[in-house]
Amino acid sequence: MALIEIDNLSVTFTAQGRQVRAVQNVSLNVNAQESFGLVGESGSGKSTILRAICGLAPISGGSIRINGKAIATPRGKAFSRQVQMVFQDPYASLHPRHTIDRTLSEPLAIHGLPGTDQRITKALTDVGLPTNFRFRYPHQLSGGQRQRVAIARALMLEPEILLLDEPTSALDASVQAETLNLLSRLRAERGLTFLMVSHDLAVIDHMCDRILVMQHGRAVEELSRDALAHAEMKTDYARSLFAASADRMLEG
Amino acid sequence: MSTLITWLRDPNPASRLQSKLGQSYLSWLRLRRNPLAMIGLTISLALVLMAVFAPLLAPHDPIAQELSRRLLPPGTAGNWLGTDDFGRDILSRIIFGSRITLYIVLLVILTAPVVGLIIGTIAGYFGGWTDEILMRITDIFLAFPKLILALALVAVLGPGMENAVLAIALTSWPPYARVARAETLTVRNSDYIAAVKLQGAGAARVIWGHVMPMCLPSVIIRVTLDMAGVILTAAGLGFLGLGVQPPLPEWGLMISAGRKFLFEQWWVATMPGLAIFIVSLGFNLLGDGLRDVLDPRSTSK
Amino acid sequence: MTLLSVKNLRVTFDTEAGLVEAVRGVSFSLGRERLGIVGESGSGKTMTGRSVLRLIRPPGKITADQMEFDGIDLMRASEKQMRALRGPRIAMVMQDPKYSLNPVMKVGAQLMEGLRQRDRVSKAEARSKAIAALEAVQIRDPERVLEAYPHELSGGMGQRVMIAMMLIPNPDLLIADEPTSALDVTVQAEVLSILDNLVKTRGMGLIFISHDLRLVARFCDRVLVMYKGRVVEELAAKDLLHAKHPYTQGLLNCLPRIGGSRDPLPSLDRNAAWAN
């Protein structure tokens, strides 16, 4: 049985009387300790799927099950200990007026967990930040350091599933490499399950075992890592996405 | 001193307190670069000091009447700003009047913005029906001219300083609610709010700990800019005889009393008028300077 | 022939935390060629581009031993002279068309505004020129786009409109600051080839500012690699794979590749000495 089962999911936003169908009948399964990638261009609905899982987008059809159980609405505290999310823009996902200490201790306070000091120190060390950063404000950190804090925050409650919404697209290439390495290491160490969204096929390929290509809110094609490496895609859209991405590789 | 500054500027503070103070120190440095704001700050501080040390600073008793020395012009020895129609020293009355002004301002600051902030953030955060109801109430209050509403309230409650404060507070919270709501609407959908919701935080925690700190700067700026208005409304109520009662030396009341002699003895009304003008200007300059320092949009870079 | 020559350019910001140098002694010269400026965020690449147009807001300050464009001393030019240069002679395309187009004005009106006011052409002529400009950036239905508001255009379309707008006065130098970073990959390639074509056929100088080394290498003749406000390496684009500086090499190697190995990506060990 898969850990995350998404069945015929549809998300519809109502804006000014108009209905926008952001996701239409998408199904996917993610096994425990697997890393699953959603790839597509802007407006493909890939991020909306993650937001729908978290209860941040309105589900208009279909179902989401985690561990075989339909997820509760509102999501509740049990859900937050199981699933956490890392957002795209580290400049927008940390509270600008809270210190790192406050940001990391908040989940502990919400769930009444003991040992705040040791947990924060450990969390900072785990994501490769010096512990004397603890009382800094986000604007005193670089983009990569902020994203490390966001990852540390997501892991404070020791969830088994991590939703990654373009975690490196706002970062410089070298910082992206460091962040991806950190995520891979944490997944290996803790046996995490990743559901990762990106517009960058190369990043998804580096991180994920299976990939779902999306376009205009619909699933286009599911690919294994091998199929991607050998350019064995069946649909035209997936092929053009692959071509555009491979185009950027400067082969020596 | 230099060790204190190094401590404040330490890039790796060792406690929440140190990091908070360090940030305040940086804001202070930013404020200090704005000369107009510093003038405003000086005026505001002078007002506070004047109020605290009024008995030491004032040359005369502000209430003691001396009818032989009535309506003396400014520059008279012993009464540098002249005397009023009861022979009371105007300088002393202005100095003691700063206590009343400050008292009113402080009471209004402690009530109206707090109420406005709570109503505005709740309306903005929940949206829907809550928002509709709270904001329509706000609109009703906003629809009345401030002074008229204050007048009506004082007429019901009876004249007096406490009632004047209550009337001003009740009429000045709606703009804060509006500001706080607008700010909440921009903050509500941000990723950091989504993140804390995802950690299982309830609405009260999100509003109190995460939304309000973001609304606070705009509200503080608005408060400093409104202080002049509060002083003027208080003076207006005093002028109409509905606020502070004689013989207390309230500035608006003093203007009202001097009105009768405005052409012959201009100083009786002009001196307290100047005091109101200077203090209002001071608060406005300070508010403008704080806008540059506290505005989250300018500090995010 | 040298179109632009910059010697020892510095941009300093006087902040409450002390002086911050965003650009520290950058020198380069440019003919009618395509020059790429590459660097990560905070490297000063954008500031370098903006300095050429003297578009640095206070408290930022520009100093340079020399900054000359086609015989005009940009350091000495009056604000009026600079205004006459910006647009007609030196144009700039920014990262996100969302922020560069006026949201409450129709695209057509924005395109024609400059023509009508600066060149005093008739309305009909301005319109035909605007349509020609849109066709030059391969917009298929220019009539419809002229009547659209910016929010009705997709990102790629908006960026093409921006490019069209910048190219109407036929500038001698185009500064493109991350012109495709906000666009989808499939659109990126199109916009870049349009830009490339226009620059080639019109014989313009191009300064292409980007964080993406590979992208720049494909579109430029020469590349400046910037790190912390300094140029650490200058090289011909075709020699990029033989870059000597460890920073340039690091930038090249740290991107994942499709079908590449799953080993940790090579990380860039920043050496403090590079900044000196």
Image (spheres, rainbow, N blue to C red):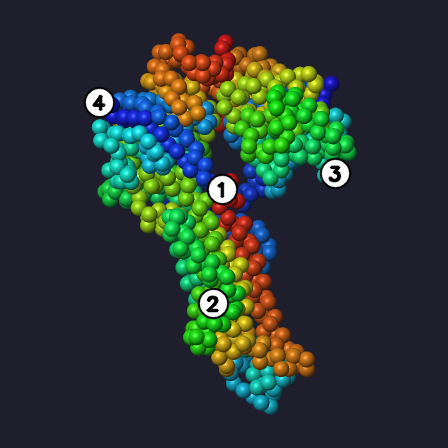
Looking at the picture, how far across and down is residue B280, in whole percent?
A: 56, 64
Crowd tier of the residue under label 2, counting other residues whose Cα lies within 10 Å: few below 14, some 14–19, many 20 or above: many
Residue under numbered circle 1? B300
> What subunit carries mark 3?
C
Please provide percent x and percent y for residue C4.
70, 25
Residue drawn at (50%, 55%) of the image: B221
The residue carrying mark 2 is B168
Q: Say if residue B45 shows up in the picture.
A: no
Q: Are marks 1 and 2 on the same chain?
A: yes
Q: CA distance from mark 3 to mark 1?
A: 32 Å
Question: Do pointers 3 and 1 mark residues of a single chain?
Answer: no
All told, the count of numbered labels is: 4
Tell me, yes or no, whether the two marked residues, 4 and 1, touch with CB atoms within 8 Å.
no
- Could you tell me the amino acid type at mark 2? Ile
Query: The residue under label 1 is which amino acid type?
Result: Ser
Residue at horizontal 66 percent and vertical 34 percent from the top = C110
Q: Chain of mark 2?
A: B
Secondary element at image label 3: helix
